[in-house]
């Protein structure tokens, strides 16, 4: 059974002289794209949470001027619940604080991911399309030499 599966799977071409030379260009690009995707999803989540903070602030500002015994409705877990303003305001404030802490955590994670991306780009000499054209010209993107590791750079669109 192992012989059948090995005959249908192509072997990686990154073994040179009996030593493994590292991941292939496709693997490098795939890992880079995955890391960029993770960073983008963190950024979109942070933007979404920032919008929620703004909504909470707007509601808090509106309710500050209202009579504390007045009825208000709040959506809790998909269920509309009737409360008073004096019950809702503290809950909104604490929710806003929790969301702010989550946004701070996401921003820290995005900065870390950005540093990882930069290190990865430098390690594998990755250039994005349209980057560095004014100083180096397009020949730098297609040149095989010049890298600090002696390998070819990877061009990512």
Image (cartoon, rainbow, N blue to C red):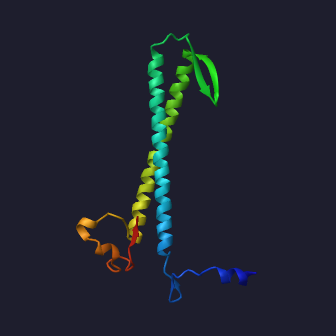
Q: Can you say whether 29 is above or below 111 in the image?
A: below
Q: Can you say whether 131 is above or below 60 in the image?
A: below
Q: Can you say whether 91 is above or below 150 in the image?
A: above
Residue 50: percent from the left, percent from the top? Answer: 45, 37
> Which of these two is toward me, 83 or 26?
26
Residue at the left extreme of this rendering = 135
Residue 85: percent from the left, percent from the top? Answer: 54, 16
Residue at image x 47%, y 22%?
60
Count of numbered tags: 0
Residue at image x 48%, y 80%?
21
Quadrant including the N terminus: bottom right
Quadrant including the C terminus: bottom left
Q: Is any atom of residue 82 visible in this view? A: yes
Residue at the right extreme of this rendering = 1
Q: Is any atom of residue 147 visible in this view? A: no
Residue at the bottom extreme of this rendering = 17
Residue at image x 45%, y 19%?
62
Residue at image x 47%, y 62%?
33
Residue 7: percent from the left, percent from the top? Answer: 67, 84
Residue 151: percent from the left, percent from the top? Answer: 39, 79
Q: Is residue 72 left or right of residue 59?
A: right
Q: Is residue 134 left or right of residue 29?
A: left
């Amino acid at each position: 059974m192992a012989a059948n599966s090995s005959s249908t799977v192509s072997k990686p071409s990154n073994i040179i002289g009996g030593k493994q030379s590292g991941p292939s260009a496709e693997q490098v690009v795939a890992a880079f794209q995955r890391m960029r995707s993770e960073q983008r999803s963190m950024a979109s989540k942070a933007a979404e949470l920032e919008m929620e903070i703004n909504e909470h602030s707007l509601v808090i500002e509106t309710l500050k001027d209202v009579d504390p015994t007045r009825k208000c409705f709040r959506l809790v877990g998909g269920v509309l619940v009737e409360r008073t303003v004096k019950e809702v305001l503290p809950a909104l404030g604490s929710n806003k604080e929790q969301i702010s802490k989550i946004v701070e955590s996401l921003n820290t994670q995005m900065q870390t991911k950005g540093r990882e991306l930069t290190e990865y780009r430098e390690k594998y000499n990755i250039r994005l399309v349209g980057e560095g054209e004014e100083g180096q010209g397009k020949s730098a993107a297609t040149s095989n030499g010049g890298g600090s590791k002696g390998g070819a750079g990877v061009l990512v669109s």
